[in-house]
Image: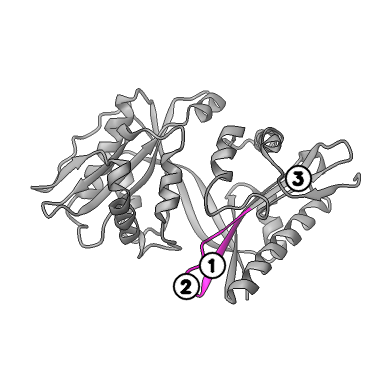
């Protein structure tokens, strides 16, 4: 292989080249995921991500990007373990050489910096689709072990959607980002505090997401109890660039949850049905979502009960730095 030079992300001039590499790899691997410079820009401006520290680019002598890796390290918390979730891409003609080894070495070095700073265990985390045998074998050779399984599911919106039924006294409305953001964050964290691998959402992170050009307040719903408590939510989104790449007309149930103390009243099902109706009103043909296969509150059964079917399985792999 030609000599490669490693560097960090410099500025927005890198975005197009990174997006082109990611899309090339996904096309060759027959994966549906893709990205654009606009979508990368949204990720790179996340307040919990430092693109200069948390990205690495490998390029040849002509300046062509051959490899790329990013790592998202969870905010410091009281938990004895924090996560360093990374993703990497290698140009198909360079796969199977030494570049993958260099990528993993950089990931471990960056995570080790954080481990020493925080004096705690860091979980290195990477995801592979269950049919990506070569990627799975590579992760295992690097000492990663399967940790958790997630399903991607879909439902045609051409099929009838039941009407949502709410407990008496509950109000459904669209949250006001300028007024309701603190209450929404508190509800979100209280909802997922007992879920696997939860890290508290901050107000800064929520405000960043609300600035996403694809955010649509008419696809964002909250249920409020008679005591005026934010109790359940369903946030949906549609990504026009994603639909252009896939040639399909799809929308996502991006976040769905019911606050502890308000479960087992049908709120989760009602909010899900509200989201499906909203996506159909937006003229989306298919709704998609992701779910933890071992969700403790029966989410998988809920989704199946309203017509979702499994498309693929993603496996989360982990390696500890102690």
Image point 56% across, 36% down: which residue?
39
> On residue 297, which mark appears?
none
Determine which residue is flagged by label 1: 82
Magenta highlight range: 71-85
Residue 99 visible here:
yes
Question: Mark 1 to mark 3: distance in Å?
Answer: 26 Å
Question: Residue 49 vs residue 185: left or right?
Answer: right
Residue 185, position in %: x, y? Answer: 34, 54
Question: Residue 264 vs residue 310: left or right?
Answer: left
Nearer the observer, 94 or 181: 181
Image point 39% across, 53% down: which residue?
203
Residue 36 visible here:
no
Q: Classify the position of the C terminus by image quarter.
A: bottom right
Question: Residue 207 vs residue 124: left or right?
Answer: left
Q: Which label lies toward us, 2 or 3?
A: 2
Nearer the observer, 99 or 213: 213
Residue 232, position in %: x, y? Answer: 25, 50
Closer to the N terminus: mark 2 or mark 3?
Answer: 3
Q: Is residue 121 magenta?
A: no
Image point 31% across, 57% down: which residue?
186
Residue 19, position in %: x, y? Answer: 66, 35
Determine which residue is flagged by label 2: 79
> On residue 67, which mark appears?
3
């Amino acid at each position: 292989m030609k000599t490669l030079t490693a560097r960090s992300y410099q500025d927005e001039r890198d975005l197009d080249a990174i997006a082109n590499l990611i899309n090339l790899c996904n096309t060759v691997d027959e994966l549906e995921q893709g990205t654009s410079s606009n979508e990368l820009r949204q990720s790179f401006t996340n307040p919990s991500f430092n693109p200069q520290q948390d990205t690495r680019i490998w390029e040849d002598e002509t300046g062509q990007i051959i490899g790329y890796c990013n790592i998202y390290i969870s905010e410091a918390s009281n938990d004895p373990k924090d996560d360093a979730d990374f993703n990497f891409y290698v140009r198909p003609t360079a796969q199977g050489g030494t570049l993958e080894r260099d990528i993993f070495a950089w990931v471990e070095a960056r995570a080790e910096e954080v481990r020493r700073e925080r004096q705690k265990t860091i979980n290195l985390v990477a995801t592979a689709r269950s049919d990506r045998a070569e990627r799975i074998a590579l992760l295992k050779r690097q000492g990663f072990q399967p940790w958790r399984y997630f399903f991607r599911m879909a439902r045609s919106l051409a099929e009838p959607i039941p009407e949502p039924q709410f407990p008496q006294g509950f109000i459904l409305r669209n949250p006001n980002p300028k007024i309701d953001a603190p209450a929404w964050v508190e509800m979100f964290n209280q909802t997922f505090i007992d879920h696997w691998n939860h890290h508290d959402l901050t107000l800064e992170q929520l405000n960043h997401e609300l600035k996403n050009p694809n955010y649509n307040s008419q696809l964002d719903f909250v249920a409020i109890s008679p005591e005026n408590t934010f109790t359940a939510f369903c946030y949906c989104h549609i990504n026009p660039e994603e639909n252009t790449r896939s040639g399909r007309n799809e929308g996502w149930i991006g976040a769905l949850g019911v606050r502890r103390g308000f479960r087992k009243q049908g709120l989760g099902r009602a909010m899900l049905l509200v989201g499906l109706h909203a996506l159909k009103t937006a003229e989306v043909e298919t709704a998609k979502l992701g779910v933890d296969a071992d969700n403790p509150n029966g989410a998988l059964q809920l989704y199946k009960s309203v017509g979702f079917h499994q498309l693929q399985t993603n496996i989360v792999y982990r390696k500890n730095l102690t």
